[in-house]
Amino acid sequence: MNQSFTSLLHNKKAHLLLLSLISILLYINTMGNGFVLDDFIVVKNNTFTTKGVKGIPDILRYDTFRGFLKSEQSGSAVTGGRYRPMTLVFFSFIWQIFGDNPAAFHLFNILFFTLLCLVIYMVLERLLRIRWPDAARPVAFLSSLLFALHPIHTEVVANIKGLDEIFSLLFSLIAFQMILLSSDTGKRHYYWIAGILFTLAMFSKENAIHFVALIPLALLMLRSESLIQSAKAAIPLLSGFAVYMAARVAVIGFTIFDPPLKDLMVNPFLKYRGVELVDASTSEKLGMIFYSLLKYLGLLIFPHPLTHDYFPKQIPLVRLATPVPFLSLLAYGLIVFFIIRLWKRNPISSYALLSYLIPTLLISNLIFNIGTPMGERFIFVSSLGYCILLAYGLYAAFHRPKLVWPAGIGLGLVGMLFSYKTITRNLDWKDNYRLFSTDIKVSRNSAKAHSSLGFDRMSKFRETRDTALASKILDEGILHLEKTVSINPREISCYHYLGNSYYMKKNYLKAAEYFDKYLSYDPNNYDVIKNLATAYREEGRNLALKKQDLENSLDLLMKSLKINANDARTVESIGIAYGAMDKYEESLNYLHKASDMSPRDAFIIVNLANTYYKKGDRMTATEYMKKAYQVDPNLGNKLSQTQKDFF
């Protein structure tokens, strides 16, 4: 091996400098991004966070979603509940100082990720230095470098909300370092510092619990400490876990193993039988789980394409005996086999595999339902085990003359490709539309991906003043909302949006169809009931004004009247329909009722005048036309501007 390369592999100062520079440079372009996706839940639209430090008591007192949902049922918004106050408290401090400035939040994500990469290096270097002094720094450096470079981490770093993952791993690893210091120096107070740090890790995100197993296993396997001594390392960690659980139960109750909701968006193990949602079979549940587990492995090896959304039905609900889940089962069986086989022969590799497997099991849905089939952010911790394994393999290759150059070229190529992917992927997190419109190309079968893009387009439509552009945006929104309900017919909010969208396009029958579908799930929503009546009214009125299909026109108007009997425009429209059918007495009856309901509506009075005129009563028609102008002296201009078709 080249002397200068060997020197670099053992130069601690160079390692720390390179890791710092690379981590910052890879993510510096996120500083131009705004608040995206879950950032609105934990920061931008969270009433507790945006109070600054004054909101901290509420953050500690309630579940993580309360400040966003503002509902007493917020604790059950996702399966198992969420209590992760640590990052929200930190966000409150940032908001207090920097206000509504996403660049400040992104900067802290970059800095803490950089710190995390440095801590990974220091922990691994200390962990390995006793038994493998020559390998400690090279393996620590290569592991940290690969972790910093891996594009799978873009969701965590580029999304401000991802700070919970960073904090959880960061505090866990610093706790690990304290335990190693205690082991090296014999000073027991480091144990209790570790307990405090691990408590902070748990309050950041509860999946830190896997370190209760991983830290003692590291001492047992890589430090050759006795089983009893290794087990003692779990005591401060279990203490931190107990403190967290006590606080969690006090705030949201013991919800971890609560039965999942009958909602496809928070329980992926459901399927449609006709129009009903039913539980998937055990084989289908295991099939989806192992399908996801194989995809995790694939993304660690080849992180492309990436997406933030794996909600149903992006990951198919397939039986365990089908090819992909069965192959996954074999792959994980091999991982377990090699963990056992290499336990004593190659403990670093065995521990690396354990460091991947244990955290992955916790987010796999095998132990408890996490509310979604998978997510790239979920393997943030697991990826460290993969990076350690790959780093140790590279280190071994660098010590074989025939493999030095292939390994070096391979590392350089991976570094360039990973860097390019990370930097370009960061740009996709610029704003919601950029993220949703990019990731929909990957998550084509996700109901949530389509609904997110559809809702975003509806919001943009309301802000757009350019008529042609607004129409294009509305059509795009409709496309994705219709795709949503084709995947998940119970995503009823989409029916409401679709009804409103088609109403704005003046396709009133289609609007009524979607309002009616909404009401089949939620029959008591007053706003939608009112919208349905309005859609029937406008379609019926249009037909009446155009003198087309007058029987259907009258039928639609009567439906509208039955829903909302107090709408003067509906009553007037029925009068117009009867007039178009030359049934003048019925027409006048309804027009007079409409005028009584809305006496200051000059247009209704004009319709009365026109109907009397067509009936042959010109004197009465003239009186009503005069009355209309008395009610509204500017009526003439309004009639010419609206080009209203009165008869």
Image (cartoon, rainbow, N blue to C red):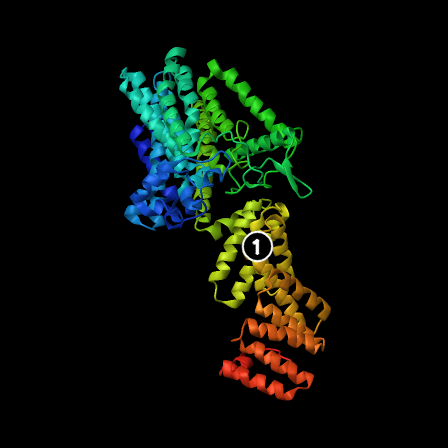
In the rendered image, residue 366, in percent from the top left (x then y), is placed at 55, 28
Q: Examine the rendered structure and indicate whether residue 452 appears above or below residue 87.
A: below
In the rendered image, residue 217, in percent from the top left (x then y), is placed at 42, 18
In the rendered image, residue 495, in percent from the top left (x then y), is placed at 59, 53
Q: Which residue is mark 1?
A: 496
Q: Secondary structure at mark 1?
A: helix
Q: Nearer the viewer, residue 408 or 379?
A: 379
The reply, left or right, for residue 263 in relation to residue 147 is right
Give the residue drawn at x 49%, y 57%: 459
Where, by quadrant of the figure, is residue 19 drawn? top left
Where, by quadrant of the figure, is residue 477 drawn? bottom right
Residue farthest along the bottom direction in this orientation: 619
The answer to whether residue 3 of the structure is visible from this angle is no
Where, by quadrant of the figure, is residue 272 drawn? top right
The reply, left or right, for residue 506 in relation to residue 133 is right
The reply, left or right, for residue 573 in relation to residue 224 is right
In the rendered image, residue 155, in percent from the top left (x then y), is placed at 45, 41
The answer to whether residue 458 of the structure is visible from this angle is yes
Q: Nearer the viewer, residue 638 or 341?
A: 638
Q: Nearer the viewer, residue 123 or 247?
A: 247
Specify the amino acid type for callout 1. His
Q: Nearer the viewer, residue 278 or 529?
A: 529
Q: Examine the rendered structure and indicate whether residue 291 appears above or below residue 230.
A: below
The reply, left or right, for residue 170 in relation to residue 623 is left
For disc 1, the neighbor class at 10 Å (few under 14, some 14 to 19, many from 20) is many
Quarter of the image containing the N terminus? top left
Quarter of the image containing the C terminus? bottom right
